Image: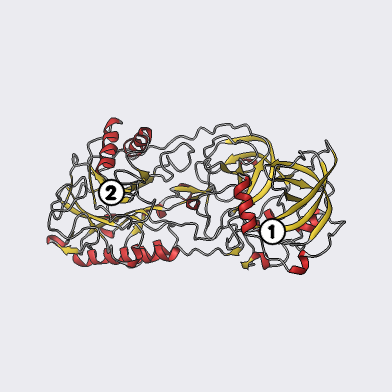
């Protein structure tokens, strides 16, 4: 799986202080004998890099290693041997760590003396790969104005990366022997570490984010399954090594959306940092916009119930007014003003300020006002306030799940018990605390099922929800027909998961058990609803944090009769977010058998995930169910 962006990216060579601190804190262990060895003269960069992830000379002193400087940063430079050998498995480039800004410039012919080291961004315990470096003791400039070594061209007409991250080899790849660049994408990029690389006619497969943009060379020729709008779909167990991530560490990059292009040839040096190989372009490229439009769903017809999802990604009263308008536009123009919207990521009234506030009525009021201002109908709100700091997310924000709903087309929310202040989520005096009281399924007349609490939280004391958003169940009626809706925001992938381009293969995903445990709890609740009413209508929505073929989603559907609606879409449309250039389906709507039998249409409305200037990084979704007949 792709490495979680949620962990945040620290950037290569971005500041001297951070890089130097990490280098001093996380050197790889080397034998004392190697440290004391005399400098090895007559060595070339290929001897230092070797045909492996770790240098065979790690810890050894080397003298007068020749090369031509190809790029310079604040604490070192990259150099490359202008006379390469014929072994594609050994890189001809290397980073020279000088601590302070070097005096050498691009085009200088140099000879470097120092110690070979392996720098692991993130520290010695990080699952990322190490970068081979020379910790320079001296740099002798032998001449100026040397021609830069020819770049390695990626894609058709040059070297084409394999279509798999790793071949058959698993475990710790740094201990796995010789590189296999023809079969392993991980080894392919390792064999180019520190070298000049060229991409021609690149096309963006993800939006610009934090100074990076993922692209495919040669307009995507020969790449894996593309989306209908120009991205590339994440494949089970593989992270699409044909992608390459551009980084602005050496030159500014233009803001880009999916489908935007960088025509012509663009050169840079290949680096590795915090779970990804990155191409540091040495000049700002020219951008040609792809003209990708934001999608718009059709409005529901008179007899259709429309239920949507919207991720608000930390919305709070201090968010810019334009962000409120953009998110309101996603609901009104994007989704066509559904009857019910399952909302996640809405923060309390003072956002990240950690002062004990949990009420979110001011945030909600601003959102509802923004919906009205962009031409939407009047919406109401139901939720349950979390206990302070108990639901994860950003500290102090008390992010929660809730329901926006309109009542002008036949939908009514069943309040049980009657709330003292529904907008604020306050319970009536004397009632049990709804933040920790579990909702139960209740038998109703006519074979339907209701809820003991509406809205109510599903098993909020279960360990599966420790430090995470608790799912919210609501009972609604649509022109007299009773429906149970469950809104979710499961535990996300995080920095605890190992990166796809890391030393451990296949990468461990320690957050997956949390989502599987949460799936079991929600599935158990759905079965209890079905046991209470054989004709019960159930809709499960929200961010499940995994794709439709994952174990947690299969756990949710097993034995419940729930059908995952994204699974019915063509593969080219089946994605709700773009992570590091990989398009994947992390947001879902599932229907019970009784509703699935009705005519229905499901739509992922692509208007967030592919754009650099976006209010949220997930696409909203909507299902329209024809309930006009009996």
Q: State the residue at coordinates (80%, 49%).
A: 138
Mark 1 closeness class: few <14, some 14–19, many ≥20 residues within 10 Å = many
List x then y, in percent, for residue 254: 57, 34
**Viewer can see residue 155:** no
Q: Is residue 468 above or below residue 621?
A: below
Q: State the residue at coordinates (73%, 68%).
A: 31
Quarter where residue 184 is shown: bottom right
Q: How many marks?
A: 2
Tell whether label 2 touches label 1 (CB within 8 Å): no
Question: Which mark is on residue 302?
Answer: none
Please state which of the two labelled residues, at mark 1 or mark 2, is closer to the viewer: 2
Q: State the residue at coordinates (36%, 38%).
A: 319
Task: Name the colouring of the figure.
Answer: secondary structure
List x then y, in percent, for residue 104: 77, 40
Q: Is residue 11 above or below residue 457?
A: above
**Viewer can see residue 274:** yes
Q: Nearer the viewer, residue 138 or 65?
A: 138
Quarter where residue 331 is shown: top left
Mark 2 closeness class: few <14, some 14–19, many ≥20 residues within 10 Å = some
Residue, disc 2: 357
Q: Earlier in the sequence, mark 1 or mark 2?
A: 1
List x then y, in percent, for residue 309: 33, 47
How far is mark 1 from mark 2, CA to CA?
47 Å
Q: Secondary structure at mark 2?
A: loop
Q: Nearer the viewer, residue 308 or 191?
A: 191
List x then y, in percent, for residue 559: 32, 68
Along the horizontal axis of the image, is 225 left or right of 383? right
Q: Nearer the viewer, residue 34 or 206?
A: 34
Q: Secondary structure at mark 1?
A: strand
Residue, disc 1: 118
């Amino acid at each position: 799986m792709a490495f979680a962006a949620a962990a945040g990216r620290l950037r290569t060579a971005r500041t001297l202080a951070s890089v130097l601190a990490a280098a001093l804190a996380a050197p790889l262990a080397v034998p004392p004998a190697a440290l004391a060895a005399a400098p090895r003269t007559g060595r070339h960069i290929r001897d230092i890099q070797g045909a492996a992830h770790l240098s065979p000379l790690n810890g050894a002193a080397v003298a007068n290693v020749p090369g031509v400087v190809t790029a310079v940063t604040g604490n070192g430079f990259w150099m490359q041997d202008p006379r390469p050998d014929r072994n594609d498995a050994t890189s001809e480039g290397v980073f020279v760590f000088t601590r302070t800004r070097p005096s050498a410039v691009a085009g200088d012919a140099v000879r470097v003396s120092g110690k070979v080291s392996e720098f692991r961004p993130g520290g010695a315990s990080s699952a990322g790969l190490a970068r081979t470096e020379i910790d320079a003791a001296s740099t002798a400039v032998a001449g100026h104005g040397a021609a830069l070594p020819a770049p390695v061209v990626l894609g058709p007409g040059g070297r084409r990366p394999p279509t798999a991250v790793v071949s058959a080899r698993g475990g710790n790849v740094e201990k796995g022997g010789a590189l296999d660049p023809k079969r392993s994408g991980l080894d392919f990029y390792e064999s180019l570490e520190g070298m000049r690389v060229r991409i021609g006619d690149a096309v963006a497969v993800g939006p610009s984010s934090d100074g990076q943009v993922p692209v495919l060379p040669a307009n995507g020729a020969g790449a894996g399954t593309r989306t209908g709008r120009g991205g590339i779909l994440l494949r089970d167990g593989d992270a699409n090594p044909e992608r390459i991530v551009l980084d602005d560490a050496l030159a500014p990059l233009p803001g880009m959306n999916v489908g935007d292009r960088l025509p012509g040839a663009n050169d840079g040096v290949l680096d590795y940092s915090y779970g990804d190989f990155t191409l540091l372009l040495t000049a700002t490229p020219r951008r040609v916009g792809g003209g990708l439009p934001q999608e718009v769903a059709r409005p529901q017809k008179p007899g259709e119930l429309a239920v949507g999802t919207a991720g608000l990604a930390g919305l709070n009263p201090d968010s810019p007014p334009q962000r409120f308008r953009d998110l309101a536009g996603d609901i009104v123009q994007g989704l066509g003003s559904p009857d019910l919207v399952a909302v996640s990521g809405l923060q309390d009234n003072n956002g990240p300020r950690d002062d004990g506030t949990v009420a979110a009525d001011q945030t909600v009021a601003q959102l509802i006002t923004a919906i009205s201002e962009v031409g939407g109908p009047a919406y109401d709100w139901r939720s349950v306030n979390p206990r302070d700091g108990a639901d994860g997310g950003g500290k102090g924000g008390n992010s929660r799940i809730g329901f926006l709903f309109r009542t002008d087309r036949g939908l009514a929310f069943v309040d049980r018990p009657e709330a003292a202040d529904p907008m604020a989520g306050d319970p009536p005096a004397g009632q049990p605390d709804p933040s920790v009281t579990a909702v139960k399924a209740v038998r109703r007349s006519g074979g339907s099922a209701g809820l003991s609490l509406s809205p109510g939280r599903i098993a909020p004391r279960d360990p599966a929800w420790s430090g995470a958003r608790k799912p919210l169940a609501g009972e609604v009626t649509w022109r007299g027909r009773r429906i149970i809706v469950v809104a979710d925001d499961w535990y996300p992938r995080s920095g605890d998961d190992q990166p796809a381009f890391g030393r451990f293969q296949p990468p461990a995903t320690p957050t997956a058990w949390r989502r599987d445990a949460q799936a079991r709890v929600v599935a158990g609740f759905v079965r209890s609803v079905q046991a209470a009413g054989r004709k019960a209508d159930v809709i499960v929505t929200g961010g499940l944090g995994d794709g439709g073929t994952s174990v947690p989603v299969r756990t949710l559907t097993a034995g419940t009769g729930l059908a995952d609606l994204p699974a019915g879409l063509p593969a080219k449309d089946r994605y709700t977010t773009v992570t590091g250039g990989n398009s994947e389906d992390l947001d879902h709507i599932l229907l019970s058998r009784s509703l699935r039998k009705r005519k229905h249409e499901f739509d992922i409305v692509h208007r967030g995930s592919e754009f650099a200037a976006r209010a949220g990084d997930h696409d909203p979704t909507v299902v329209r169910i024809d309930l006009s007949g009996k």
